[in-house]
Amino acid sequence: MSNIVILTGAGISAESGLGTFRDEGGLWAQHRIEDVATPEAFARNPKLVHQFYNARRAQAREATPNAAHHALAKLEAEHKGSVLIVTQNVDGLHEKAGSKNVLHMHGFLEGALCHQCDHRWAAPLEMSPEGVCPSCGAQQTRPDIVWFGEMPYGMERIGAALAEADVFISIGTSGEVYPAANFVAEADHFGAHTIELNLEPSAGASRFSETHFGPATKIVPEWVTAELAR
Ligand code: BV8
């Protein structure tokens, strides 16, 4: 009865057509992080930031899960122990594939948040600086996204899961963003077997006990099949 904690990043959604961040032509290649993913950027130019997230929300709504997302949903359904997906992604492709136990540590494109009263609601397709909070009426709505410099969601729950993990597997992430990039060290500290599945070695590849490289739609189903057959 092993506990499995899975960290996913933009690479697992790449073959569903959603842009990654740091690959050639990735999202950050089109926009400087400072321009669109910090509270300062939002204060400086809320219209630009809303446009950036409106475009990604529309793209994510059209996207469909790929074989890697479906393999992880199959793992959760059939694995005897617990399976938790901690995703850095803000798309809903894990849920669309049928995964239930998903924690969006960097927020979620389908979520809206009021800067004034912390009320949360389902985001409309297009948000704008003119939007008002349905609860308190303040004109201070923002995407429910964790920007650089902000506290990621679920850190306590993630820490507790890493302490109990028998297997920690990192899929499709460059290992450049903290605190997510440190999870492998935490899991290793608590004795978990650590695995990286990525297109190519990430910044933290040497910190994993086991690595497999290739497209997620190939190596994730292969790994899940082997894990379920164990
Ligand atoms: C925080 C918003 C305090 C949503 C994002 C100096 C040193 C250490 C840390 C810092 C530092 N200076 C500043 C920091 C902190 C900062 C940080 O880490 N900065 C980095 C840039 C150095 N972190 C923060 O500010 C975080 N908050 O630290 O608060 C704190 C600390 C501890 C505990 C509590 C509080 C907040 C970080 C969240 C920022 N928000 N996004 C959005 O717009 O999407 S981060 C952004 O990058 C995305 O969320 C994305 O998920 C994330 C990570 O990127 P990846 O998912 O890894 O994507 P990337 O393109 O980089 O890589 C894709 C990978 O996939 C590649 O490896 C590629 O090879 C692979 N791939 C591609 N195709 C495929 C594939 N793999 C398989 N198959 C394929 N087909």
Image (cartoon, rainbow, N blue to C red):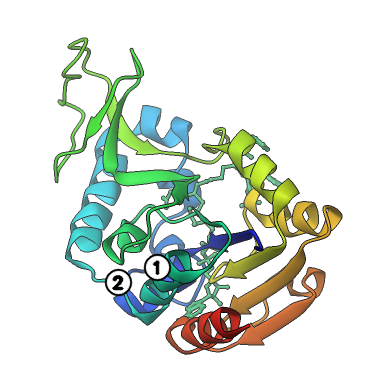
Q: State the quadrant of the C terminus.
A: bottom right
| Rendering quarter of residue 198 | bottom right
Cα–Cα gap, marks 2 and 1: 10 Å
Q: Residue furthest top?
A: 136
Q: Residue at x 73, y 53 (%)?
A: 182
Q: Residue at x 55, y 38 (%)?
A: 152
Q: Residue at x 22, y 12 (%)?
A: 138
First reached walking from the N terminus: tag 2 or tag 1? 2
The residue identified by callout 1 is 73
Label 1 packing within 10 angstroms: few (<14), some (14-19), many (20+): many
Tell me if I can see residue 2 in this picture: yes
> Quick one: SS at disc 2?
loop
* Position of 49 relative to 116 (above/below): below
Report if the CB atoms under discs 2 and 1 are less than 8 Å apart: yes
Q: Nearer the viewer, residue 156 or 172?
A: 156
The residue identified by callout 2 is 65
Q: Amino acid at mark 2?
A: Pro
Q: Residue at x 17, y 20 (%)?
A: 132
Tell me if I can see residue 174 in this picture: no
Q: Nearer the viewer, residue 30 or 21?
A: 21
Residue 76: x and y, percent?
46, 64
| Rendering quarter of residue 97 | bottom left
Q: Amino acid at mark 1?
A: Ala
* Position of 99 relative to 133 (above/below): below
Q: Is residue 66 left or right of residue 193?
A: left
Mark nearer the viewer, 2 or 1: 1
Q: Quadrant of ligand 1?
A: bottom right
Q: Nearer the viewer, residue 227 or 46?
A: 227
Whether ligand 1 has any atom under 8 Å from the Cβ at mark 2 is answered as no
Residue 188: x and y, percent?
81, 59
